[in-house]
Structure formats: C-alpha cells, structure tokens
Image (cartoon, rainbow, N blue to C red):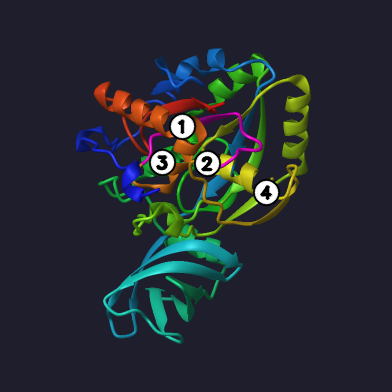
Amino acid sequence: MRVADFDFDLPPELIAQLPPETRGASRLLHVDAAGACHDRRFADLPALLRPDDLLVLNDTRVIKARLYGRKDSGGKVELLVERVTDEREALAFVRASHAPKPGARIRLADDLAAEVLDRQADLTRLRFPAPVLDVLDRLGRLPLPPYIEHAPTTADEARYQTVYADAPGAVAAPTAGLHFDDAMLARLDARGIRTARVTLHVGAGTFQPVRVDAVADHRMHSERYMIPQAAVDAVAGTRARGGRVVAVGTTSLRALEAATQTGDLRAGSGETDIFITPGYRFRTVDALITNFHLPRSTLLMLVSAFAGRDAIRAAYAHAIREKYRFFSYGDAMLLERRP
C-alpha cells in the first residue's frame, strides 16, 4: 500500500476552528457494516447503540505541553513535551535555530531552566528542577493541533478536554470523547449501555506527518497505555451478554488492541507502537466512534482497516459533499466494523 492511497482533497473551510457552541451539538455520520452512510446528530447516539453495548472511554487528560524559552546564547526555543518519563524528566520535540547539545540549559522563566540530557532519535531528553507536571501547569500552553489557527484560550482549556479526563499525560485530546457531556453519559446509562475506562496518553507523534511513500515503511511513536482489571471484566461481561465493544476514539481502540496482541485482553500497562492498517484482524472492538482524520494520516489508515477502504473513501466523499466539519473540533462518525 502507498500513503498516497489515503489522500483526499479537503476544502479548508471544512476544518473546524472552534468547537460547537455546546458540547455534543455536532453531527454524526453513521457508517453501517455494509458501508451505507446515514446522516444523524450526535444526540441520536443512544438510539444507535444497543442495551448491553459497552463504551470504552480513554480517560487521559491533556497537559499544557508547549513551552517557550531561551538558550544561554539568547536563541529562542520552543518545546513540545511528548512524554513525561519520570517525575522530573521528559522527552520533547525541540524547535530552535540550532539544536541544543547535552549539558545545555533552556531557561523557561527567571527562576527555572531545563537541562538537555541527550537525544533519542528525533526527541530530546530534558531534566527539570521541579516536577514536570508542575512546571507545565505553571508555564505551559495547551498544545492545540497545528491546523487550528488561533492561539489557545481559556475556552480551549475546557473544551479541548473530555468531561471524564482524569490521568494527566496526553499532548493531544482523544477527540471523539469531546462530544460527550454528563447528560449524554446519563442517557446512555439509562438505556443500559455501560462504560469502561482505559488510559492511553496521546503523544505528539499524532501531529507528525507520514513522510514515507510506502505504508509499511512508516514507524509509529510509542505511547503509554493502561488497561485496568475493571475494563477487562467489563469487556468479558459484554461478550457474555451478547453486547458489542464500542471504542470511543482511535486511542481507546489502540489501547484495547495493543493489550490483546498475545491473546485475550489482559489488564496491565505498557508501551505500544501498534500500527493498524488494512488487513489487520481486530480482536476486541466491534464499533468505533471517531472524528474525521487528516489526509495521508495513520488514523485514516486505521479507520480504513476497521470499516473498509472503499467504505471510508465513500464516507469521506459524502461528508465533504454534505459539509461536515473535520478534525479535532469537528463532527463525529459511528463506524460499524466490516464483517
């Protein structure tokens, strides 16, 4: 497969720059198992799911991962923390006129500087003089995706976060979850649709373009995930009742599928660089709620694997004709897995 096989033309005006006025007031494109498209509202979701279905939510919390500072020479530096690896250490993408070398200091405030430890591929390992999460909370900025053109605001700090976010560590939101509010979760519960939580800390690699021509040559950045025993038990109970496992977002799906690579779903934590492309055999997830993804992206490849390349190609063409809103602040899809 070629990366160009997953390209499409998107009118720029369909890239959502702001979330809908109220959480969940978005459209929903339902793509059934036969590939047919149905135009819905996200408010219709409870009627499209079945009692005894299980929604699996990613409870990661977005951190203020973007930092600005200066080298000792005075040169400007921009940091995007990709992953917190220890209380006072992190891996980050560094943008500067000349990459700082090990031993260099990056001054983030008058009283605070980070030390460059070493390079790990395209990431730089940094040591902070205080807990990393505390530094980010004090000095960091929300890392909105590059296609959102405005600077992050206090409104973004609320809306670029799910209502059930709990475990800090993501540098991008699990955006399918942004559509849910407490009232929707209550409606789903009243219908007998259960929820379970997993954690996958979305890394900055989600923003990185695919720079190779052949899909097989691409390498994913690894991300940290955790599957609690309660989620494993919920999946087993859902299977026993004849219900479906519905992943809320590609991150929930990747966590579940990563945890079943050696057999049955198991509780635990680890790192995953799972790359799901057409031909992948899904082990856990039966349906997927997701947003619309960028052209030539690994996430577009994932949904093509899940629903079928032809079905996704037709669905995206339909969404463009019907002027759905795309990407993080855009509309949603409900995909049923191709038989």
Amino acid type, residue under disc 1 in the picture: Gly
Q: How would you rate the neighbour count of disc 3 (Cα within 10 Å): few for under 14, some for 14-19, many for 20 or more? A: many
For the residues carrying marks 4 and 2, which lies nearer the camera in this image? 2
Mark sitting on residue 300: 3
Tell me which amino acid carries mark 3. Answer: Leu
Check disc 2: other Cα within 10 Å, few if <14, some if 14-19, many if 20+.
Answer: few
User: Mark 4 — residue?
Assistant: 261
> Residue 280: horizontal and vertical position, in percent?
55, 42
Residues at discs 1 and 3 in contact (Cβ within 8 Å): no
Q: Nearer the viewer, residue 198 or 285?
A: 285
Disc number lying in front (1 or 3): 1
Label 2, on which residue? Answer: 279
Q: Amino acid at mark 4?
A: Gln
Q: Earlier in the sequence, mark 1 or mark 3?
A: 3
Residue at numbered disc 1: 308
Query: In whole angstroms, how far apart are the C-alphas of marks 1 and 3?
Result: 11 Å
Measured Cα–Cα span from mark 4 to mark 1: 21 Å
Q: Position of residue 333 (x, y in %)?
A: 44, 27
